[in-house]
């Protein structure tokens, strides 16, 4: 498990702010959702960075990713971890091998592959059919 597997959105925002030396206002100016044009305010970024609850939504998450210069997937996973208590991991522990197949499953904390038999069935069926997604 890496640090990215346990980080929260609050940690991403506060560490990025600290490391960059930028103010929340400066980060806000860069935090624009490329899809909707929504801009995360300095106040919202401050709330996120200090761990306060905010209304989380896709435009906000995309804006934060832009503002911090981080991948959207990383920011989405951190937001899901913090606000929903979900984990994003490979519960099957499979090595991707030569086909580079990687399985990621979002689930609540404490579940293992044994608790997710339907997920394993769907993956096996997809492989049988040769689906790529």
Image (spheres, rainbow, N blue to C red):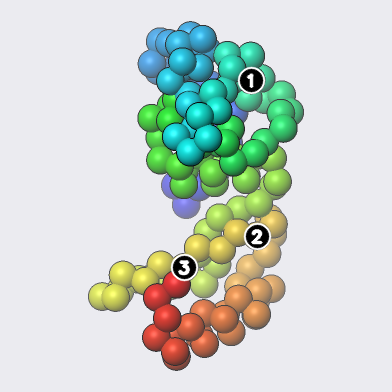
Q: Residue at x 52, y 12 (%)?
A: 24
Local crowd size for mark 3, using a 10 Å CA cut-off: few (<14), some (14–19), many (≥20): some
Of 14 and 59, nearer the camera is: 59
Of 13 and 27, nearer the camera is: 27
Residue 105 falls in image quadrant: bottom right
Q: Is residue 23 above or below residue 45?
A: above
Task: Where is residue 40? Give x, y as percent.
Answer: 57, 23
Q: Residue at x 66, y 51 (%)?
A: 86
Task: Where is residue 4? Give x, y as percent.
Answer: 46, 43
Q: Is residue 87 above or below residue 31?
A: below
Task: Where is residue 20? Give x, y as percent.
Answer: 38, 16
Q: Mark 2 highlights which residue?
A: 107
Q: Is residue 46 above or below residue 61?
A: above
Q: Secondary structure at mark 3?
A: loop
Q: Mark 3 highlights which residue?
A: 103
Q: Residue at x 60, y 59 (%)?
A: 106
């Amino acid at each position: 498990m890496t640090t990215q597997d346990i980080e929260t959105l609050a940690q991403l925002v506060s560490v990025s702010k600290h490391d960059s030396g930028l103010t929340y206002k400066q980060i806000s100016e860069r935090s624009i959702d490329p899809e909707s044009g929504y801009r995360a305010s300095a106040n919202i970024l401050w709330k996120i960075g200090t761990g306060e609850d905010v209304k989380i939504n896709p435009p906000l998450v995309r804006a934060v990713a832009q503002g911090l210069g981080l991948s959207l997937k990383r920011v989405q996973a951190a937001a899901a971890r913090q606000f929903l208590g979900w984990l994003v991991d490979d519960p099957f522990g499979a090595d991707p091998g030569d086909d580079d197949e990687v399985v990621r499953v979002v689930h609540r904390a404490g579940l293992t592959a044994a608790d997710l038999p339907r997920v394993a069935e769907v993956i096996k069926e997809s492989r049988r059919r040769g689906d790529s997604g």
